[in-house]
Image (spheres, coloured by chain):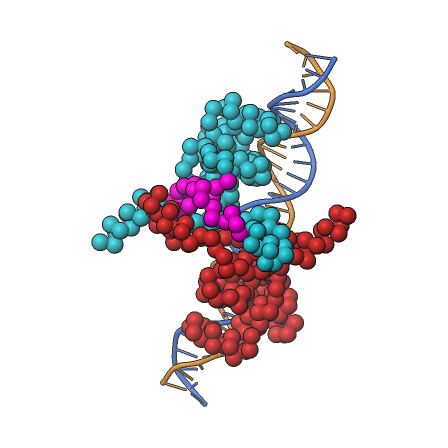
Chain colours: A cyan, B red, C blue, D orange
Amino acid sequence: MEREQGALILRRLGLKATPRRLEVMQCLVGERMYLSADEVWNRIRVRLGSIGLPTVYRILDELAEARVITRIFSADRKQYFFMCANQEHHHHFVCDSCRRVVDFAQCGLEGLAGEIASSTGGRVLSHILQVNGLCAECSRTESEVAR
Amino acid sequence: MEREQGALILRRLGLKATPRRLEVMQCLVGERMYLSADEVWNRIRVRLGSIGLPTVYRILDELAEARVITRIFSADRKQYFFMCANQEHHHHFVCDSCRRVVDFAQCGLEGLAGEIASSTGGRVLSHILQVNGLCAECSRTESEVAR
DNA sequence: GTATAAATAAAAATAACTTTCATTTACATG
DNA sequence: CATGTAAATGAAAGTTATTTTTATTTATAC
C-alpha cells in the first residue's frame, strides 16, 4: 500500500493520517499471517523510533471497527488482526499451524438469514464465519512428517 | 437433565461425577441464554454451599473441550457458554439484545471444505459459524420502541 | 474399608488489554 | 505560512478475566 493510499483511507474515515497509523497499516498490508497487537508493535517500533503499545491497540481497534482490517479468532482468545485486499463480502481460511490467512468468497450463507428469520421470527444482523485447517504448505509438511 | 444422566455423560468422558460438575451441568441445561463463568458461579454457589470460581472455569473448560457445551462468541471477548440438547452438527443464532441462543441445523457449508481444499490445496479441519441478530421477541420489542 | 488418582479450595499470579491525563501533532482556517 | 483546536499519543497505572500453584479432600475401583 502506498502511503498516500493509506492516508486517503484514513481521511475518508475521519481519522488523521498520522505516521503511527500509516505504519500500522503498512505493517499489515502485504502480511500473509495474522498478527497480534504486540507483534505489530514490535515490528513497527524499530522503524518509528518509538510508539506505545496502547497506541497500537487503539489503532488496530479503530481499523477493525472501520472494517479496514479483520479480527481473526484463535483458540487462545487473544486478539489477532489481518488486512485483506478483498473488499467484497468474504471470509477467511486460517492455517492452524503457520497462521496464514487465505480469503475465500464462497460464503454459503446467502439463504441462511432468510431461513432463520422465517423459522425463528428473529432478524439476522451479522455472522461470524471462519474456516480453519492446514494451508497447502503445512498440509504437505505434515504428510512428510507422517512418513 | 436428570442427575444420573449427567453422571453418565461425565463417566463416559472419563471424568468423575462430582457434585460441582453435576451442578454446573444442571445450571446450563434448560438455560436458554448463554452464561459467563461467574454467572454460573453465582447461580450454583448458593445451592452448593461453596465452590471456587477457578473450579467453575475448569469445569466449563472441560465440558467445552468434550463438546458437552459450546462457547459463544461475544464482542466483549469474554468466555460464554451454552448447552444445547441438539447433538447433531448445528450452529447458533444468538440474540445481541437478550443473549438468547437458538440452534439451527442448516450449516450451508457442506461443500465449502471441498472447495477450499481444491482451490487452496489446504485441508479444512474445523469451522466457526455463529449468526447474530435479534430474536423474535427482541425484534418485536424494538419495533415497538421505534414507533 | 482403603488406596489412589482425580478434583477442589484458596490464594496468588498472570497477562492482555484499558484508562487516565498531560503533552504533542495534524490539519483546517485565516 | 502561522496558528488555534480537536484529535492523537506517551507513559504510567489500573483493571479484570482467567490461570496457576499447592495443599487438602473426595469419588471410585478394588
- Farthest right residue? B147
Residue A109: within the magenta? yes
Up-down relation of residue B40 to residue B2 (above or below): above
- Residues A66 and B45: in front is A66
**Whole-percent x and y of residue C8?**
54, 71
Up-down relation of residue B75 to residue C21 (above or below): below
- Residues A127 and A45: in front is A127
Q: Is residue B128 left or right of residue D16?
A: left
Image point 76% across, 50% down: which residue?
B145
Q: Is residue A82 left or right of residue B77?
A: left
- Farthest left residue? A147
**Whole-percent x and y of residue B50?**
61, 72
Up-down relation of residue B109 to residue B26 (above or below): above
**Whole-percent x and y of residue D17?**
58, 55
* Residue A41 in view: no
Image point 43% across, 41% down: which residue?
A103
* Residue B26 in view: yes
Residue A41: within the magenta? no
Count up the numbered dots: 0
**Whole-percent x and y of residue B43?**
64, 68
Up-down relation of residue C11 to residue B21 (above or below): above
Quadrant where the N terminus of chain B lies?
Answer: bottom right
Image point 47% across, 53% down: which residue?
B108
Which span is picked out in magenta?
A: A89-112
